[in-house]
Amino acid sequence: MIKRVHKLFICCLVLILLSGCWDGISIEERGFIIGMAIDVAKDGNKNGSNDELTLTSQIAVPAGLGTPSGGGGGGQKGYMNISASGISIYDIAQDVANQTNKMPFFEHLKVIIVSEEVASIPELFANVMDVFIRNRDTHRGIYVVISKGKAMDILDIQPENEQLPARYIDKILENSLRKTGEMKPVRIGDIHEYLLTESSFVLSEVAAKNNRINFEGGSVFKGDSSKVIGSLSLEEMLGYELITGQEVRGPVVVDFKGHLTAYSIREANSKIKIKAKDPKNIEIDVIIKLEGEMQETFGTVKLQKTSEVEALEKAVSDKVKEIANKSIEQAQKELKADVFGFGDNLKKFHYETWEQMKDNWDKGDNYFSNSTVNVTVKTEVRSDGVIYKSKE
Amino acid sequence: MKSLEYGDEKISEKEILIAIPSMVIGVGILSLPRRIADETIGSDGWIALVIAGAVCVLMIWLMAKLAARFPHQSFISYASIIVSKPIAKIITFLFAVLFISIAAFHIRVLGDTSQQYLFNQTPVEVVTLSFLLVVVYAVSGARAALFRLNMLFFPFIIFILLLVLIFNFRWIEPSNLLPVFQTNVKDYWKGIQTSTLSYMGFSIVLFYTAFARQPKKAPKIAVLGMTIPIVIYVFVYLTCLMVFGQISTSNLLFPTIDLAKRIELPGGILESVESVFFVVWTMGAFTTTAMALDVSILALSYIFNRMKKIGLVLILSPIVYYIALLPRDISQISLIAGLLGTIVISYSFLTTLVLFLIAKLRGVGRNDKTSA
């Protein structure tokens, strides 16, 4: 009998202990934040130290998402955007909890959009990023982009084929455009490293146009002044991507024997070799290797002879070299910011020289602007499609 | 609850082989890459890790050699032969105190880390207590069972760790390892000290060799077992560097967790792989804590040989809990970590050396002809 009471007691104890969970939040009470946009608040003072920020959080509404086959649940939107203003990002994010009945949950955060205005205020961009790098729920793979206008407008884009704007942007960054060479997806983990080393870097710049996301080029963030100081055009972005050896795919349109011809890059590689004898005159060799095929021509080229192929290869090489040189010139003369990571390369391969000159690389005396950059492009044309000619 | 009992209290070579890495790999692996990257330039930290590892391998070989001179004798009995009984008692007691502190430290770090990443609202006291209860349950049973548990857990720990390293292959940037050999001697020395601390705990060999079936083989096996954590540490460290770069690594609280968080499986099958990693890491911390507590119980049972094992467990566990909750915040914990590591390592090094030398000089124990 006593044994039975004993067992019953233990059972009750187990019941009480097992059901209790301090951290239990049911899934419907969680507000899954998938995208965030950071703007300068309208009535906040712009240049003072207390920059008031407006944070827009996009929260997924699972009920509105429906099933893949069944479509959305009765015209309900799959997301809601909530804006709040304040000084600290964390503070504002907690405010979201008061506006909705949900607890903010950052683990599924995919994209952070920062308006150009915020990024142009010194230190503010780094300060804003801190909370996302520091938070234990966010991961280091979150994409960060700069918006030309209001950042919150980007989160209002409602594409026909996707129910969540943030997901749409995330997918674009992840899949398609990475390969066209016009933009570089930068992740928050990379930004952490850039900020720690005070390096300059490029962030993709986007704008909302006609319910679509539009890539405007790249915003250049200068490491030592800790703000966005200028931008790269789309073509300069391509040059930048090619020089830094990103995964670039996409067309290069050249003028070949008086006709437009589109060459499509299938694989791009780059090698950077630096001769660092004299810190005041660093010689940088950039070798870009391209591999691809002819996709379209307005003329009647027949890539049969080796000489023809070589001529086209040369035309492409020249064009790419021109693009790359333009990007370099923009970076050296206009922006005076080493966005190509040459400094990183110097640190890795010429550590001793780098230690002497690291304070004068793209700041101080700016040796970067005075360095000589030689671009060599090697192009290979692999094929020209399934026909010889389309017209006489 | 009836404790499980095995026919014999002897442990096989394989079990010793696994026990050493299970003991060494504990909570330290989470912050190890940061601590090493903080003190060295580029990827030079691996040199510090390997040198420190080599020293520890030498030490563990000496320990096992010492214990093997007196086959099937407990630590206190051979220590008594070498340096009279009272001194042996003091040495054993100090070992017990140190291992109690190791256990307490592990419990606290596990509690803190779990609170950071898993249970935001749960008080750290509760997490710590529930972990301690499981550990107490493990050590109150047969000792052989603990070793068999190690055998069971260890493959999982290695497998998941490897998985974390492999899935990060996408993010690896080998040039992050540059520059090499730029660290100055002073920083190397610091790095070696830090690395040595991360290997603490292997002095269990002094106590556990007594249970080995073939003590003769113990030195070789101990050395082999010790190389496992060295290899793992070097791999984890280098992967962290290649993924995050040296500067980021030195600024992450737990680079190894971030490594696990970085994983994105294709198709989004599993997001947050780090939860799996946490489970496995808890297993690793569990084996370390359980063995540390077990060694301290073993050491105390030699001194107070009239006490029953369960009595010692019941007295020790509140003490462990109390010590675990002493540090107030994370800075105090890391301060204690450094202090504890230094004391444990230097104490075990010193005792082993002294005991070994005296044993050699006095010619006690099995002579060298048979042990060589």
Image (cartoon, coloured by chain):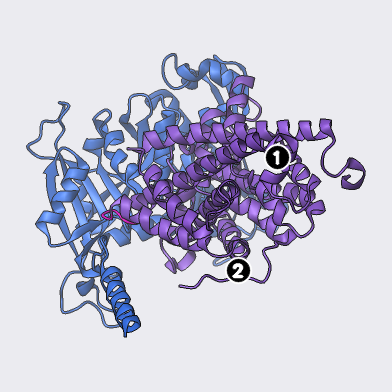
Chain colours: A blue, B purple
User: The C terminus of chain A appears in which quarter of the rendering?
Assistant: bottom right
Q: Residue at x 52, y 70 (%)?
A: B3
Q: Where is residue A236 shown, x and y percent of the image? A: 42, 39
Q: Residue at x 19, y 49 (%)?
A: A93
Of all residues, the one furthest to the front in this rendering is B306
Q: Is residue A330 left or right of residue B362?
A: left
The answer to whether marks 1 and 2 mark residues whose Cβ atoms lie closer than 8 Å is: no
Label 2 is found on which chain of the structure? A
The amino acid marked with disc number 1 is Ser
B95 and A315: which one is in front? Answer: B95
Q: Residue at x 21, y 42 (%)?
A: A89
Label 1 is found on which chain of the structure? B
Magenta span of residues = B118-122
> Disc 2 marks which residue?
A387
**From the viewer's perspective, is the residue at label 1 or at label 2 nearer?**
1
- Main secondary structure of the magenta stretch: loop
In the displayed structure, A12 sits above or below A107; it is below
> Disc 1 marks which residue?
B80
